[in-house]
Amino acid sequence: MNIYFLVEGNSTEKKIYPKWLSYLVPELTRVKYHDHVQKNNYYLISGEGYPAILHDGLDNAIDKIRETNNYDYLVICVDADEETVDARLNDVQKKSQDRNIGNTKIKIIVQNRCIETWLLGNRKIFDSRQPLESPLLDYVNYYDVSQDDPEAMGSYNNKNHAEFHGEYLKEIFRAKNICYTKRNPGDAREKHYLQELQKRTAFNGQHLKSFQTFLSFCEMIKTQIST
């Protein structure tokens, strides 16, 4: 089993996905170069944002997959941003359909709205009942992500969805005297953080539905490797 991951972000996903994959599918080993895959390996590279990922990023990925001829999956990870998951999914499907990559299957994972939205689902790091200061207090009064699905949260105060969700997450981390940035996601990479997100989906299967798509894919890969 070999997988080519093409992720939208140039920083956060490149730091978080490898760590999470090591917990969810420890049988997979990352390789530094695309042509080093042998058995149960994956290669991960950024598509340098959207829509660049659907042009140069996708073209380069397909060229490398054809050259290597040893990948089972091409996994394309993008943000929904201001679109719905279905609209963004359709965009990616239109760009990737009918591309000749042999037996390599394409899997599209849409982060709704962005990876920071997923990270807002950790109930252990954030308790809205604790004393809060602005701007976090304002954010909670607008939408309490500890109770309601982060993926259903809107935008706020003239910010777009991804910008607001990212600011919300930073304020939650700041309230704990820890730091989150796209270049340094800190605890968000760790196993305990991932486990809290998994607990959230187990507690309420209607929350973090796009994150559950990622978890389901990892579980499928793990099962295929073990059989």
Image (cartoon, rainbow, N blue to C red):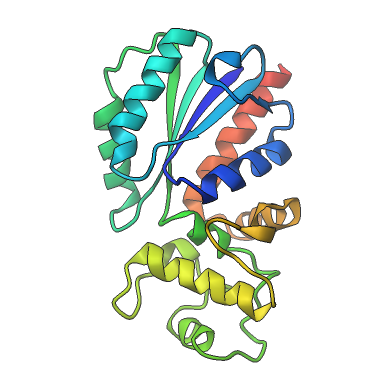
For residue 30, which quarter of the picture? top right
Count of all numbered marks drawn on residues in the image: 0
- Report if residue 107 is visible in the image: yes
Drawn side of residue 124 relative to residue 12, left or right: right
Drawn side of residue 139 relative to residue 98, left or right: right
* Residue found 68% across the figure and 72% down from its top: 178
* Residue found 58% across the figure and 18% down from its top: 2
Q: Residue 116 at what x, y percent from top left? A: 51, 60
Task: Tell me the quarter of the image containing the N terminus.
Answer: top right
- Report if residue 207 is visible in the image: no
Q: Residue 172 at what x, y percent from top left? A: 59, 75
Task: Tell me the quarter of the image containing the C terminus.
Answer: top right
Indicate whether 61 appears above or below 153.
Answer: above
Drawn side of residue 217 relative to residue 82, left or right: right
* Residue found 65% across the figure and 69% down from its top: 123
The one nearer the camera, 143 or 61, is: 61
* Residue found 32% across the figure and 67% down from its top: 160
Q: Residue 186 at what x, y percent from top left? A: 66, 59
The one nearer the camera, 175 or 184, is: 184
